[in-house]
Image (tube, rainbow, N blue to C red):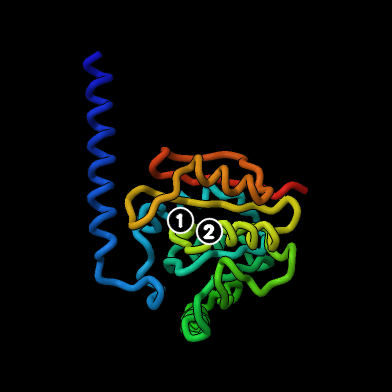
Amino acid sequence: MAVVVRILLALVGLVVSAQVARRLARHAPFDVATSREAVPVQSALFAPDRLIRRLPLEPGMRVLLLGPAPDSLMTRVARGVGKYGKVYVLQPSPESARRLDADLRERHLANVEALVGQASHLNVPDATFDLVLAVGQLAGLPRRQRALWEIERILRPGGHLSVSQALLGPTFLRGETLRREAGAVGLAWREQHGLPFAYTANFRKPA
């Protein structure tokens, strides 16, 4: 019984700490819309080398990464798809896309490219991507259900959506809510890694 009580108290402490951090993050002095380096707090919790093992990522894939995204994540995903694959990083404006493309040229990441648009309105054909990757981005989208419809549209049959979320941040999307919303657009839940308050959930578009 004492062990159970200690575990419960530890979990309560984690939740309280996360709630405090969320409040602080709401007033953090950075603008995620204008700086690629100013990524949401959730992204920092998913180390790329650890996260990559949770993803249905394979060489040759075409991947859409919802930006802004840290350099380390872009580099690791680019390495995962290899020279015959391609990674597109969604950017909110032509200016931010130009900055990213210039940076990618300097770093010689030839298989990564910026894509201008919003997750709720993607100007790409149906069945374009094998994987859509959202690390700490989906919860805060103003039109999340519309974005999920768009993601379903641009995924090829058999393609995947991978969402990573953590409670430590300005917004949080519960795993149960995500499963319900993704299921409503026809994406089938496959698996979930991590804990309820810091997880990676993978979904698949039926073939």
Q: Residues within 10 Å of mark 1 (few under 14, many from 20)?
A: many
Q: Does the rendering let one see residue 98?
A: yes
Q: To which quarter of the image does residue 5 belong? A: top left
For mark 1, give the secondary structure. Answer: loop
Three-letter code for the amino acid on which mark 1 is drawn:
Ala
- Measuring 67% from the left and 57% from the top, which residue is drawn there? 152
Task: Name the mark on residue 144.
Answer: 2
Q: To which quarter of the image does residue 65 belong? A: bottom right
Mark 1 and mark 2 lie on one chain; the one further toward the N terminus is 1
Q: Is residue 199 above or below residue 138?
A: above
- Measuring 42% from the left and 38% from the top, which residue is drawn there? 196
Q: Nearer the viewer, residue 143 or 153?
A: 143
Three-letter code for the amino acid on which mark 2 is drawn:
Arg
Q: Nearer the viewer, residue 72 or 181?
A: 181
Left or right of 119 in this view: 22: left
The reply to whether callout 1 and callout 2 are in contact (CB within 8 Å) is: yes
Figure disc tally = 2
- Measuring 38% from the left and 42% from the top, which residue is drawn there? 197
Extreme top residue here? 1
Q: Nearer the viewer, residue 146 or 79?
A: 146
- Image coordinates of residue 178 in percent, x first then y, are 52, 46
Image quarter hosting the N terminus: top left
Gap in angstroms between the C-alphas marked 1 and 2? 7 Å
Q: Which residue is mark 1?
A: 139
Q: Residues within 10 Å of mark 2 (few under 14, many from 20)?
A: some
Left or right of 201 in this view: 5: left
Q: Does the rendering let one see residue 60?
A: no
- Image coordinates of residue 156 in percent, x first then y, are 73, 58
For mark 2, give the secondary structure. Answer: helix
